[in-house]
Image (cartoon, grey):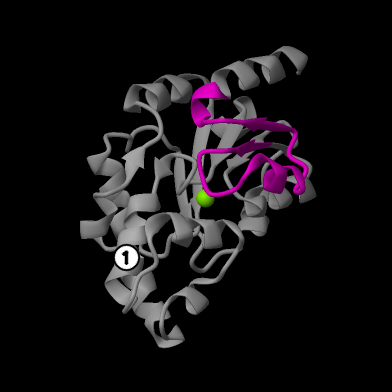
Amino acid sequence: MARALRRSIILDFDGTIVDYRERFYQAYCNFAKKPLDCKTFWGLRAQNKKMAELLDSPHFLKDFDMALESPDLLQEDKLLCPPEFLHALKKKYNLVVITNRKNEKALLLQINTLGIQDCFSEIMTTADLDKQAIISQYSKKDVVVGDSEEEIIAGNKSGLITIGVLSGLRTREQLLKANPRVIIESIMELPKVLEGLDFLV
Ligand SMILES: [Mg+2]
């Protein structure tokens, strides 16, 4: 019901709501025998270098994935906006999270610890679900916000309004190739963009 009445804002989590780089780099260092320095590592990741190639053995990939979502390491994540920002946004829009995280329990714990557990009407992990399939259930007035091409391409395919955010790994040039409607520096700029959309509809 809420979905039909209010505009839904479908938010990616890592790189959009939280800065996960410290956690990701620490997990990498735990498994690499001779870890690259932080700058080199992120430079390669920005060029889409796969973790299986960056770790000394692809056999570490499963362990790396598990460690990456452990509650200990999740404490390294930092919110990219004050919690109050999301609480205020929630009053006007139906906020939904779609993330590639696999450990749902750890994610919910993290969201609680960050004090934003009341902000979202739905939290969906895509461990067993297809992001595209979830997004296609929303209407054309709804908005997808993400820091990677993945969300933008999925949103565009379903005719939703897509917003790329530069607080993750991708550069403006990389995101532009996925053709988002708007690109913003951080989700703090969302209210301004959304008000413009509300005016149009
Ligand atoms: Mg992301």
SS assignment at label 1: helix
106 horizontally vs 85: left or right: left
Give the x, y percent position of residue 57.
Answer: 42, 86
What residue is at 53 percent from the left and 25 percent from the top? 93
Residue wearing tag 1: 27
Q: Estimate how packed mark 1 is, as few (under 14), some (14 to 19) or many (20 or more) residues with alpha carbons within 10 Å.
A: many
Asked whether residue 1 is in view, the answer is no
61 horizontally vs 160: left or right: left
Asked whether residue 11 is in view, the answer is yes
Q: Quadrant of residue 62?
A: bottom left
Where, quadrant-wise, is the N terminus in this rendering?
Answer: top right
Give the x, y percent position of residue 36.
Answer: 39, 67
What residue is at 34 percent from the left and 22 percent from the top? 84
Q: Which residues are magenta?
A: 163-189
Total number of numbered discs in the rendering: 1
Give the x, y percent position of residue 169.
Answer: 54, 49
The answer to if 165 sits in the magenta stretch is yes
Q: Quadrant of residue 106?
A: bottom left
Tell me if the residue at label 1 has its CB under 8 Å from ligand 1. no
The answer to if 187 sits in the magenta stretch is yes
Extreme residue in the top direction: 199
Give the x, y percent position of residue 51.
Answer: 48, 72
**Of the pair 48 and 189, the residue shown nearer to us:** 48
**Of the pair 189 and 196, the residue shown nearer to us:** 189
Amino acid beneath label 1? Ala
What residue is at 66 percent from the left and 58 percent from the top? 133
166 horizontally vs 200: left or right: left
Q: Is residue 11 above or below residue 42?
A: above
Q: Quadrant of residue 129?
A: bottom right
Where, quadrant-wise, is the C terminus in this rendering?
Answer: top right
